[in-house]
Every structure is written in structure tokens, then in C-alpha cells.
Amino acid sequence: MPIQIVRNDITKMKVDAIVNAANNSLLGGGGVDGAIHKAAGPKLLAECRTLSGCETGGAKITGAYKLPCKFVIHTVGPVWQGGGFGEREKLVSCYRRSLELAKKACCETVAFPLISSGVYGYPKDQALRVAVDTVSEFLSENDMTVYIVIFDKASYRIGEKLFKDIEEYIDDRYAEEHTDSVSERIRRMNAAPMPDFSKSIQYGDMAPMAAAAPSLADAVKQLDESFSEMLLRKIDERGMTDSQCYKKANIDRKLFSKIRSDRLYKPSKPTAIAFAIALELSLGETKELLMKAGFALSHSNKFDIIIEYFIEHGNYNIFEINEALFAFDQSLLGA
């Protein structure tokens, strides 16, 4: 069910189907198209000759021959002409119709290149956004694992402003972490004014303390909560179903079943954070959930700072977060 962004050669992906960014003739070309035909051998071209081409935004399926997959789905992306000639709609159609063919062929795993982002000139950051948005919409109602395959770093780009904003956010927190010496922290603590505890015993302050007692009792009960128990409680509190949560977290249903059935299950850190993102937890709540799994967030870790950036900016779109993590060579969430 999840989306995974990977850096690989699509002709070497061991999946049920790979998608070929073809031209209208379907008779081979350059880039991904040429590489797929070369790896599959001449029988692929022979079958393509029987298909009578393909319209832009359409898709057709063939055998894979010498490739390590079962099928090749050929789709024709739009040529970028500035964005005012229906390019986005045609690109969305490429992904949708390819996924529909994959579903009809009972494929469980599919690998896409970043369609139209090569010689067809579609801006890479926009091409990636269309890919992720369209695939995630399909996966919200279908069980399939989809790979977006990036051949090299130069083929991948998130929005320039977002990249710079995250880069500055990381730099600020790295600087804070590595220049704030122990002596400096002690100096600041000594310089801080002492609280006036006398005010806390005024009778007027007793009512709020009493009102807080029930939540304190609840907190005590939750001290021995495991990660699994806290996760399931948070899902109920948010009024979500299990499937809504694990799909929003980009998590496979089988993994979620393991977590649900084993109260002592210890997830990986990216998995734990993926659930925090799906539940749209605050930074404090996220740290609490991570603690239950034996993890913490640190300003010494670029991965952690990027997660903090998105939570503080109220952006809980796990696919956008993964795009940023990939751009900074970090582990991805979910999957």
C-alpha cells in the first residue's frame, strides 16, 4: 500500500510491473524508454508494434521479456509547454491509467520513473508533486506498493524555496546544538529569575489544582502504556479507523496488524514518527509517542530536525515530508 521513493535503475527493479515513459509510437526512444527496450530485448519491440501506438496521457501493457518483472506498462507523458496546455491533467492521466492497468493485471508492486521530467521538460519538482499526489490518491482506496524510481540525484528536485527553508532551519538548529556549551547553559540557568513559590499557596490557586487532578490521574494510569497501547488510544481519540491511520502513515497493513496484536512491539523510529504524523500530533505528543518506543528527537540529527520543521509548520502530509527527507538523503517515513 505505501509509496516509496528510491534511487535505482528501473530496469533492475524486481516488481510486478515497471512503467515506461514512452513516446506516441511505442517503438522505443531515448532515456528510460531506450533503456527498457534494450534490457527487455527485441521481443518487447515486436509486441509494441502490434499496439498501434498510444495517445498522450494513455497507457498500454505488454510482457516484460528479459526484464526481472512481469509486465511493462507504457505511458506517454505530455511535453512541457509552460503549463497552460493541459500538461498537468495529461500527466495525472498517465499515472492513473497506468495504475488501473496494474490493478487489472493483479499487480501488487509497481515502479514508476518520473514521467515527462527528462527531455519532455516537465519541471522536476512539479512532476514529482503530480506523481506523489496521484499515486497517494489511488492508494487511499487500493492495496499496492508503488515505487517512484529516481535514477540519480540530478533527476530529483523538490521546490527550491522549501529546500532553502529546510536547509536554513537545519543550519540554525545545528548551530544551536553545537555552540551551546555546558558552561553556557549553566550561565543561563543561573541568570534566570527564581520563581516566586509563595504565590502558589494562595487560596485562589487551589481550584485550578483540583481541576487538574483528573488529568493527572489519567497520566498516572498511562505511565505503563506501551507504544502499541498509546498508538491505539490516540487513534480512538482522533476518531480514526485503523485503515485511515496506517494508510495516512504510509504503513503496510501487515505491519500495522503486528503492532496491534503485540502490545510490546517495538517499531523502528521512522515507523513511530510516521504514526505521529498520521495522527497529526504536536511536537510534545510526538516526543511522548517516540519515548514509548525508546526513541527521542535530537538537534544533532538532520532527520529529526526535518521532522520537527514540518510539525512546527503544521504540515502533516507524509508524502511531502518524504520528498524532503529524500532530498536531504535521509530515511523515509512509513513503508
Image (tube, rainbow, N blue to C red):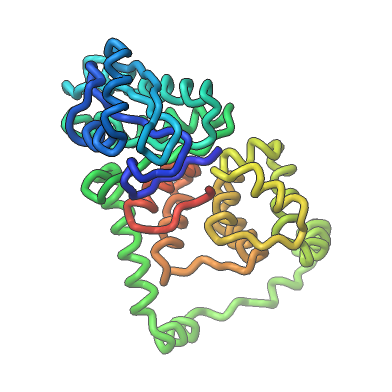
The quarter holding residue 211 reads bottom right
Q: In the displayed structure, does residue 191 sit left or right of residue 84? A: right
Badge count: 0
Q: Does any portion of residue 207 appear in the rendered image?
A: no
The quarter holding residue 253 reads top right
Q: Position of residue 36 (x, y in %)?
A: 28, 35
The residue lying at 58 percent from left, 67 percent from top is: 295
The quarter holding residue 174 reads bottom left
* Residue 293, placed above or below residue 126: below
Work out whether residue 308 or residue 20 is closer to the camera in this orientation and state it: 20
Q: Name the image quarter holding the N terminus.
A: top right
Q: Going by the picture, which residue comes out furthest to the bottom? A: 183
Q: Does any portion of residue 19 appear in the rendered image?
A: yes
Q: Position of residue 13 (x, y in %)?
A: 39, 44
Q: In the displayed structure, does residue 135 sit left or right of residue 168? A: right
Q: Position of residue 218 (x, y in %)?
A: 81, 58
Q: In the displayed structure, does residue 143 sit left or right of residue 231? A: left
The residue lying at 36 percent from left, 19 percent from top is: 59
Q: Position of residue 54 (x, y in %)?
A: 29, 14
* Residue 303, placed above or below residue 67: below
The residue lying at 22 percent from left, 16 percent from top is: 25
Work out whether residue 15 or residue 223 is closer to the camera in this orientation and state it: 15
* Residue 331, placed above or below residue 313: below
Q: Going by the picture, which residue comes out furthest to the top? A: 52
* Residue 223, placed above or below residue 69: below
The residue lying at 70 percent from left, 39 percent from top is: 242
